[in-house]
Amino acid sequence: MKHKVFKDSSLRIWNTIQQSRFISVYVLIFVALLFNVCDAKGQTEWPQTVASKDGTLISYEVYGAGEPTLVFVHGWSCDSRYWRNQISPFSQKHKIVLVDLAGHGHSGVTREKYSMKAFGEDILSVVEATGSQDIILIGHSMGGAVIAEAARLMPQRVKGIIGVDTYENIEYPLSPEEFDQMIAPLQKDFQSGTRQFVQQMLSPNTDANLREWIIADMSAAPPSIALSAMEELMSQSITGQAAKIFEEIHIPIITVNGDLWQIDYEANRRHMFSFDAIVIKKADHFLMMNRSDEFNKAMKQAIKSIAENVKEHNKY
């Protein structure tokens, strides 16, 4: 009797094990298929890398399909994450490319000088890697200076430029003394100085969590890289190169700006092929993040305007 009970129990245990193994196999197959689907679907969404002219590896992401390709370039001490609210709206009709400039995000940090020209070469390398032919360059803040350099390197590919809260006055006569006064707090204590610097660009109405994320993120940038980029950027205003570069770029330029700073249309038009601006009222420097719906609508308007300008220009 004891032997029969033991045998029956053993069979039940064995059957349970077999059933468990059977279920486990199917679970494993399901999980494997799930991962394969996710991998196939998201493969192009992983960051890719390409070497810039000086060998620095540049990280970039590609989404969607359709021309013109939209190349998004972040600002000072930021990275491609700052465009996350633009991925879905614009990748539905366009191939979009998000770039981490050298020294930012996931890109290499081997460069000694982080100049606007070298950043422009980063964009050129990425564009060549994606094979894009018709391009609109989009640059936030310092990214505006970067895409101007990139446009000069790709005159046949770039059809237009969209600045994001930048190009308020490309003639602004910054003096060395003004610059020294501006950068001194960052040189003394980079994290504290950057926090104060960034706070001035944010609206009190910005979501508190987003506000703190931006401030903390930018103030955590590598000081040597951030200071080098800042010095290189501001030297263009001191020397007048900030305006002169646009005399070599014969394409339409539009900005989507907040109203923190006044735009000098006449100063810009003295150097630009064409210039116009879309201003979002009561928006701050990070309007693509904290006013994304209005920003995206304005961006679509700017893209349409550039496309119409190019079409009209091609008639002649």
Image (tube, rainbow, N blue to C red):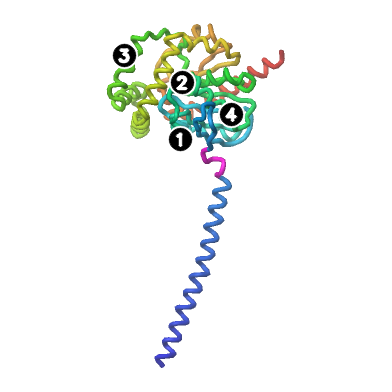
Q: Tell which tag, 4 or 2, sits nearer the viewer.
A: 2
Q: Circle 1 sits in a helix, a strand or a loop, which is it?
A: loop
Q: Circle 2 sits in a helix, a strand or a loop, which is it?
A: loop
**Which of pointers 1 and 3 lies earlier in the amino acid sequence?**
1
Q: Which mark is residue 127?
A: 4
Tell which of 235 and 94 is nearer to you: 235
Q: Circle 3 sits in a helix, a strand or a loop, which is it?
A: helix
Q: Name the residue: 56% across, 10% down.
A: 247
Gap between marks 1 and 4, in whole Å? 17 Å
Tell which of 19 and 230 is nearer to you: 230
Density class for disc 2 (Cα within 10 Å; few <14, some 14-19, many ≥20) is some
210 relative to 293 in the view: left or right: left
Quarter of the figure that contains the N terminus: bottom left
Q: Circle 4 sits in a helix, a strand or a loop, which is it?
A: helix
Q: Which mark is residue 181?
A: 3
Identify the main secondary structure in magenta: helix
Gap between marks 1 and 3, in whole Å? 31 Å
Q: Name the residue: 50% across, 10% down.
A: 243
Gap between marks 2 and 1, in whole Å? 18 Å
Amino acid type indicated by mark 2: Ser
Residue annotated with mark 1:
106
**Which of pointers 3 and 4 lies earlier in the amino acid sequence?**
4
Gap between marks 4 and 2, in whole Å? 19 Å
Q: Which mark is residue 115?
A: 2
Q: Which residues are magenta?
A: 42-47
Tell which of 61 and 113 is nearer to you: 113
Q: Is residue 174 above or below residue 278?
A: above
